[in-house]
Amino acid sequence: MMFVTRITLLVAIQGVAGTLVARQSRVDGGVPVKIDVLQPKNFKELGAKRVKITYGPLAIPSAGDKDTGGMITYSDPNLVVPCTGCFITGMDTDLQWEDGTTANANKGIWLHHTGLMNLNRTDAGCPEWPERIGVNGNERSSFDFTTKGTRKAGYYLQKGDQILKAIDVMNMSDLPRSVYLVMEWEYIEGTPSGFDVVWPVWLDARGNCFETPLSKTGVTEAPVFNSTMLEPGYTVPFDSDLLLLVPHIHDGNVAQDIFMDGKLICTSVPAYGETEAFVTHEGMYGHEHEHEEEEPAHEHGPHRTRKRQDHDHESSGHTYHVSSITQCANIGKVAKGSKFLLTSYYNMTEHKPMTGHDGKEEEIMAIEFLHFARPFDEAMKDIQSQGKPNLQSFVDTVRGLDG
């Protein structure tokens, strides 16, 4: 079983195939932005706001394109964000067609990866790099730093912060496509009393700085294996609250565990095929193809891993894909010096890994974003004392993984 070490996530800083918008109007090489005002979900009494920002259109080549194979990365080192001098309290990401409906696997389009970096701050796990804020995949996880309005916390955007957004989109159709990246942002302007600063940490089986080859973490050619982050893991250099844990894994995953000082504190379990948008049929180009409009309607029931249904789509021409994964919230106090590790569990017999157009299996991923809550003054003092991050170091490292 071959795992392709292909990390396009956030690597399109140089030599990109395209560029997302860098302003609120069309610019050379860019795409336009549309902003819609929505009703906030939490903290209305504190003046919370919510907007939907649509970036696009993004032109995605066909699966038969010789240069890209249908996979393209767009990047913007100056992403349009809803505010500065504000707390980002929640983020949601989607890929949509022009009519506003979701573009997903059943129609041959994948939000393969998308990620955010703050180019003005250094990363908690790999201090030479810019700060990694969050990562997402086709599961399209929500980031709610308030945990449904129960916590006063958010990612603080300073004036002048430069946010980079990169997105990998994969087209499995033999036709070129046009899609839109859509993000909903919830935020509170200013510095409301009692709000903590969210401090993101990227925890990865490959190590904080991707220093460990996947083969060293336990990944094998056998269909069932565990991928475990090696010692020393990540050690927290401050007292804090562990507010939110958001995982990112790939098809084939059955669970992911997070350990603090050797104690299990969080288990995330993926669901597969909760809606027909996450179910594909085997077919074109040696992998799954989208449902055609003329196909007869039929149901694709959801299931969590480890719970099989009587009708097994994965053995009858259908394939379930990861459609969500559980998160953990409000874990509690974390003392300075606490150590975090993770183990991710894969079963490629129970759930097929995704394959590319060349027939090779996509690499596995085992990532968990830990979001710590810190008092505002303390966090800002640390931010202001940081040096300048080295974006080129990050790019070079990821390109090295790309082989």
Image (spheres, grey):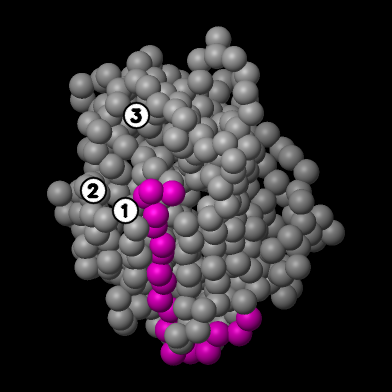
Label 1 sits on residue: 223
Res 18 → quadrant? top left
Secondary structure at numbered mark 2: loop
Find the distance from the CA under tag 2 to the CA under tag 1.
7 Å
Which residues fall within the magenta stretch? Answer: 332-350
Horizontal side of residue 168 vs 50, given as left or right? left
Which x, y percent locates residue 338? Answer: 46, 87
User: Quick one: label 1 or label 3, which is nearer the N terminus?
Assistant: 1
Magenta region, mostly helix, strand or loop? strand
Q: Residue furthest right?
A: 45
Image point 60% across, 79% down: which residue? Answer: 241
Label 2 sits on residue: 1
Res 60 → quadrant? top left
Q: Amino acid at mark 2?
A: Met
Label 3 sits on residue: 287
Which x, y percent locates residue 188? Answer: 69, 57
Which x, y percent locates residue 331? Answer: 62, 76
Which dot, 1 or 3, sits closer to the camera?
1
Is 91 drawn above or below residue 273 in the view shown? below
Secondary structure at numbered mark 1: loop
Image point 63% across, 37% down: which residue? Answer: 301
Q: Does the image show residue 372? A: yes
